Image (tube, rainbow, N blue to C red):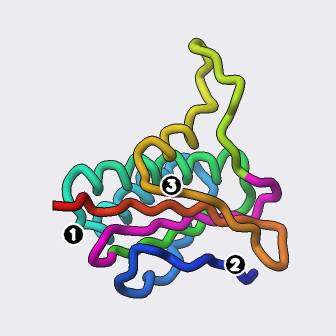
């Protein structure tokens, strides 16, 4: 599968190879540990936000996607980018009818709240998708 990637705006080094994780909820913790290790140069708040957003996107890939979950991340001089891919069809979108008592449906709202920007790319050829997000370092 070839993923068509848009151009990262954070700059920096090339991403490390994809980390393949089983489509199992236990993989969420493994993804958090990978992000903590790979993005350790971020400021503490940005690292926490990257870990939280990764948890949400990996959970969505496991619950709504198919096949193994692929994670890669890299930090640059101005922030970081994380990409999470799976082989499932469909386009991720924030839930619009989430009630106060609902247990699910807020993941991409959280991603939008703690990241600078996020989006998704369809795999070419499909099926499959990659959800990406970027977190900019705060300007001093």
Q: Which residues are magenta?
A: 76-91
Quarter of image, res 4: bottom right
Mark 2 is surrounded, within 10 Å at the Cα level, by few (under 14), some (14 to 19) or many (20 or more) other residues, namely some
Q: Nearer the viewer, mark 3 or mark 1?
A: 1
Residue 105 in view (yes/no): yes
Instruction: Identify the mark at residue 7; answer none if there is no mark.
Output: none
Q: Position of residue 62 (x, y in %)?
A: 64, 51
Q: CA distance from mark 3 to mark 1?
A: 23 Å
Q: Quadrant of residue 67?
A: bottom right
Q: Is residue 111 above or below residue 37?
A: above
Q: Which residue is mark 2?
A: 3
Magenta-drawn stretch contains 79 = yes
Q: Is residue 38 magenta?
A: no
* Residue 22 shows up from this direction: no
Label 3: which residue?
27
Q: Which residue is mark 1?
A: 41
Q: Position of residue 49 (x, y in %)?
A: 35, 49
Task: Mark 1: give few (<14), some (14-19) or many (20+) Cα within 10 Å.
Answer: some
Q: Is residue 74 left or right of residue 2?
A: left
Instruction: Please state if 104 lies on the left or on the right of 64 as rendered.
Output: left
Q: Quadrant of the N terminus?
A: bottom right
């Amino acid at each position: 599968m070839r993923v068509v990637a848009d151009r990262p705006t954070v700059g920096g080094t090339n991403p490390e190879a994809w980390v393949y994780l089983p489509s199992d909820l236990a993989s969420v913790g493994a993804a958090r540990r990978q992000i903590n290790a790979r993005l350790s140069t971020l400021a503490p708040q940005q690292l926490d936000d990257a870990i939280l957003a990764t948890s949400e996107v990996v959970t969505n890939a496991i619950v709504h996607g198919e096949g193994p979950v692929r994670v890669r991340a890299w930090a640059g001089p101005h922030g970081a980018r994380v990409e999470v891919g799976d082989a499932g069809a469909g386009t991720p979108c924030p839930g619009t009818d989430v009630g106060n008592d609902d247990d699910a449906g807020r993941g991409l709202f959280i991603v939008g709240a703690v990241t600078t920007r996020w989006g998704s790319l369809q795999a070419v050829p499909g099926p499959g998708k990659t959800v990406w997000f970027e977190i900019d370092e705060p300007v001093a």
